[in-house]
Every structure is written in C-alpha cells, then in structure tokens.
Image (tube, rainbow, N blue to C red):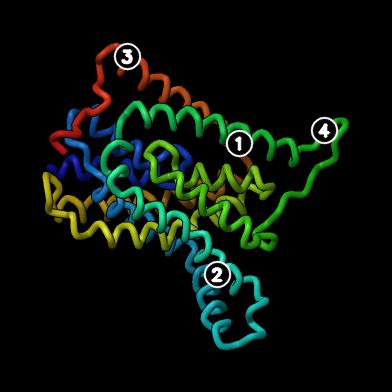
C-alpha cells in the first residue's frame, strides 16, 4: 500500500465512520473503484481506532463520568442505582453480541462478507430500514392534524433488554455495507428513542468493540500488502477527519432527517449492482491481490 492510498483510505474512514453509510463498505469500494488491493478487515479495524479516539475526546466528559460512577458502583451499593453507573454496565452488556459473533464469524468477515454484491444488498436493505425508522421518529416528533406529539425515550429509559437489542444491531455491522451507526441508530429509533439518544448510545457502545477489534487485528499488520507505516498514517488521518465529522453529525441529527443518507445508500447500492451486472466491476475486485 502506497502512502497516497493510505491517505485516501484514512480520509474515507474518517468521513464515513460516524455517518450511517458504512465505513467498511466505502473502504472496500474506494479500493475497488481505484483498482487498488482490498485493504482488508485488519486495516479497516485498525484505522477505526483513529475514529474511535475522536469519540473518546468528543465524549470525554460523558465517558469520564460513566467510568467514575461504574467503578464506584463496584464497591458502593448506593451507586448501583446511578444512571451513569448503569450506563457503564449497559455498554458492557451491549458489547457482548458483537464480541461473540466477531470471533465466531472471523473467516466470513475476512472473506465472503467482502463480496461487492453482498455490500450492494446491505446498502439498499439497511437504507430502507433507516428510512422507515427515520419516518416513524419524524411522525412522533411532528405529530399531525389527528395526532399529538409523542415523547420519545431517552438514555434514562435504557435497560438491559434494549441494550442487548442495540448490541445485536451493532453486530450486524460485521457485514460491510450495514454501518455500525446506521444499524444501531435505526434500532434505537425503532425502539422509540429520540435521535440524539440513539446516536449517543451508538457511539458509546462502539468504543469497546472497536478498540478490542483493532487490538486483535494488530497481529495481522505487515502481512500481505499492508504495512505498519501506511496503516498508522491512515489511522491518524481518520482521527482528525473523524473528529470534525462527529462534531458536525451530532448537531445535524438534532434538527435534520436521515433521508439524504437513505437516498445515498440506495442509489449507491443500485449503481453497484448495475456496474457488476454490466461487467464493469468484478464482485471480487482486488480480493486476490489483497
């Protein structure tokens, strides 16, 4: 992998990680369209550490408060009813599905799941799901002539059941094209949470999964065409770009609809199917070399 490739892929990772359009799919597609080797699951997981570092900094006050309350709750029974302490446990509970499935499906994640036809399918299907979830949330928020405005749930309403559902939604993002934020935010909206709460828990829930996945994949750097230098460079690029994107996105979702992302996903998925069907793009482009 050249330094230019690593810069472009780091930029793509930073731009797409927090948007509900799938960063892993865009890394795969960027390489395929450019005629580069598939960067692979290891490169993807490690560059996500860069964007996750942006989450740690952006939500540093929330994270520090949650960690403090959680550690105190281990020895202080009175703290166990504290919302922040409970959030610590809920992040752990919600991380179980992706941890188990990530290890179980490792071979599929690195192989069959990277087929561009599967990515096109998940882009379209999850785009529709996100669109439905967004419309339901908008209807509750706006009310209507014959409907009153319906108050949606916040993170204070989050329990173990909803935390596990969030966790299974996050685990779906093991398939490129699903999108970690897209799946968890959609799940949250369908469960009745407001946009900000759905996005905030989505980003907090991703922290242990992304850091663990990145650490696990460190052993594979240097194998094949991906070396340490370009990988670290791409991770740094992803961090700086990702921080700017997450700051913008958290402001965007408080007032705007997810429909632009829905339309983008569906159009991109259809375009992929068309290019593959016409023989312009191979569904396995770059895989053998990568």
Residue hosting label 3: 277
In the rendered image of this protein, does residue 212 appear above or below residue 279? below
How far apart in space, not on screen, are marks 3 and 2 (Cα)? 47 Å
Residue hosting label 1: 257
Q: Is residue 6 left or right of residue 49?
A: left
Front in this rendered view, residue 15 or 95:
95
Q: Which mark is residue 89?
A: 2
Q: Mark 4 vs mark 1: which is more N-terminal?
A: 4
Tell me the crowding category of disc 4: few under 14, some 14 to 19, or many 20 or more residues within 10 angstroms, Cα based: few
Element type at marker 3?
Answer: helix
- Residue 264 visible in the picture: no
Element type at marker 4?
Answer: loop
Residue hosting label 4: 144
Instruction: Pinpoint residue 229: horizontal percent, then vertical percent.
Output: 14, 54
Tell me the crowding category of disc 2: few under 14, some 14 to 19, or many 20 or more residues within 10 angstroms, Cα based: some
Front in this rendered view, residue 273 or 108:
108
Quarter of the picture holding the C terminus? top left
How far apart in space, not on screen, are marks 4 and 1 (Cα)? 17 Å
Q: Is residue 175 left or right of residue 203?
A: left
Q: Mark 2 vs mark 4: which is more N-terminal?
A: 2
Tell me the crowding category of disc 3: few under 14, some 14 to 19, or many 20 or more residues within 10 angstroms, Cα based: few
Count of marks overlaid on the render: 4
The residue under the point 35% across, 47% down is 14
Nearer to us of marks 3 and 4 is 3
- Residue 288 visible in the picture: yes
């Amino acid at each position: 992998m050249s330094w230019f490739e690593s810069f472009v892929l780091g930029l793509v990772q930073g731009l797409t990680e927090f948007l509900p359009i799938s960063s892993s799919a865009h890394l795969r597609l960027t390489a395929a369209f450019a005629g580069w080797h598939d960067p692979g699951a290891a490169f993807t997981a490690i560059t996500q550490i860069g964007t996750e570092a942006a989450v740690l900094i952006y939500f540093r006050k929330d994270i520090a408060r949650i960690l403090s309350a959680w550690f105190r709750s281990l020895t202080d029974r009175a703290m166990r009813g504290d919302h922040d302490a409970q959030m610590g446990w809920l992040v752990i509970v919600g991380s179980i599905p992706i941890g188990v499935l990530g290890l179980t499906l490792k071979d599929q994640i690195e192989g069959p799941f990277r087929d561009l036809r599967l990515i096109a399918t998940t882009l379209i299907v999850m785009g529709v799901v996100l669109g439905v979830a967004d419309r339901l949330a908008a209807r509750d928020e706006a009310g209507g002539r014959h409907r009153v405005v319906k108050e949606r749930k916040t993170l204070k309403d989050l329990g173990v059941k909803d935390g596990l559902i969030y966790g299974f939604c996050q685990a779906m993002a093991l398939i490129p094209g699903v999108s970690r934020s897209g799946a968890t935010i959609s799940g949250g909206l369908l469960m009745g949470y407001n946009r900000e709460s759905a996005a905030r828990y989505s980003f907090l829930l991703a922290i242990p999964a992304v850091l663990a996945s990145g650490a696990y994949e460190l052993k594979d750097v240097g194998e094949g065409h991906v070396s340490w230098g370009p990988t670290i460079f791409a991770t740094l690029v992803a961090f700086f770009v990702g921080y700017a994107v997450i700051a913008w996105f958290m402001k965007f979702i408080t007032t705007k609809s997810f429909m632009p992302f829905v339309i983008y996903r569906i159009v991109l998925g259809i375009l992929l199917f068309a290019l593959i069907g016409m023989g312009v793009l191979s569904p396995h482009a770059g895989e053998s070399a990568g």
